[in-house]
Image: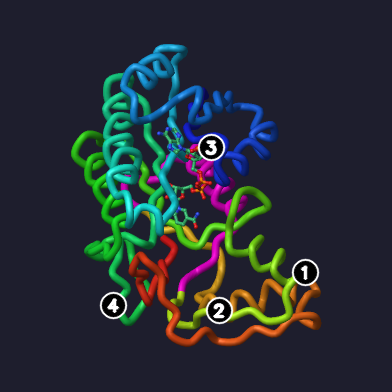
Amino acid sequence: MNILVTGANGQLGKCLKKIAGTYDALNFNFMDSKALDITKKSSINAAFESGHFDYCINCAAYTNVEQAEKTPERAFAVNADGVKNIATACKNHDVVLIHVSTDYVFDGEKKSPYIADDIPNPINEYGRSKLLGEQYIQEILDKYYIIRTSWLYSEYGNNFYKTIVNKGKTESVLYITDEQTGCPTNANNLAKYILRLITSPKTKYGIYHFTDWQAITWYDFAKEILKETNLDGKIKVERAKNYRTFAARPRNSILKSS
Ligand SMILES: NC(=O)c1ccc[n+]([C@@H]2O[C@H](COP(=O)([O-])OP(=O)(O)OC[C@H]3O[C@@H](n4cnc5c(N)ncnc54)[C@H](OP(=O)(O)O)[C@@H]3O)[C@@H](O)[C@H]2O)c1
């Protein structure tokens, strides 16, 4: 089976690359944003015509939530229009699309974990751009998996886990919000789950939620990270008061895995 991976130099792309060699039956073509820019139709056409692909795993995304609030057109160009381009190419070349989306499509007002059938209502530009991407896929394609995940971390890229470990080595006190609750997810496990979709007997196409840990606040997650890395003796974690970000964040980000 031949698999095209977009956004291959991002956190999830690198996690997929790390395990790709252990799947003998799968041939991967990893393309980073230079090799394949999903906002450019000519770039997509060239990639899809370079071979026959059974699956496209779309790891390409504009993920800077704060910056998306200031320049939403950039987020929409990648997360909505870029995804529309990829979906159209998948339709034209009969390729199954595996696309990754986010807990931020929800407003966070629900009092229990979100299931895949809950109605999205994003409260920031990043979430709105990701939701439009989802909607384009559903309009254009029959053969797709949209996998919503949350709070990704790994050894790659910039993520909360790495930030806390780095700060834990240099600072004496950290102020972390306890106003948002979600499920941290190791991007390595998400990568394995995605490849299991491809290698195991057919799962029905549609929208799924994938997370791999319990629901927790950022404050408690920071404490867990410091404990796991034996840095908890060196640094204090305090609850941040009046914590504000430019982009609004859902209070309840808990996705129920499906
Ligand atoms: N990170 C999280 O906490 C989180 C949470 C929930 C859902 N997600 C979703 O999970 C997926 C993977 O996230 P991630 O953490 O791996 O993100 P990431 O590390 O930011 O990687 C995204 C990749 O997309 C590439 N990209 C940006 N614009 C592109 C374009 N026009 N054409 C092709 N590639 C482009 C980036 O390349 P450049 O670096 O060259 O720009 C980058 O390598 C995304 O769909 C994200 O929305 C992430």
Residue at the disc numbered 3: 199
Crowdedness of circle 3 by 10 Å Cα count: few (<14), some, many (20+)?
Answer: few
Q: At which x and y percent is residue 170? A: 76, 70
Q: Of marks 3 and 4, which one's residue comes earlier in the chain?
A: 4
Q: Any mark on residue 176, and which? A: 2
Spatial separation of the CA atoms under disc 2 and disc 3? 40 Å
Spatial separation of the CA atoms under disc 1 and disc 4? 36 Å
> What's the residue type where badge 3 is placed?
Thr
Q: Of marks 2 and 4, which one's residue comes earlier in the chain?
A: 4
Question: Do the residues bearing badges 1 and 2 touch, measured as CB atoms within 8 Å?
Answer: no
Residue 111 vs 195, above or below: the answer is below
Residue at the disc numbered 4: 109
Q: Nearer the viewer, residue 195 or 46?
A: 46
**Secondary structure beneath disc 3?**
helix
Bounds of the magenta segment? 182-207
How many labels, in total?
4
Spatial separation of the CA atoms under disc 2 and disc 4? 21 Å
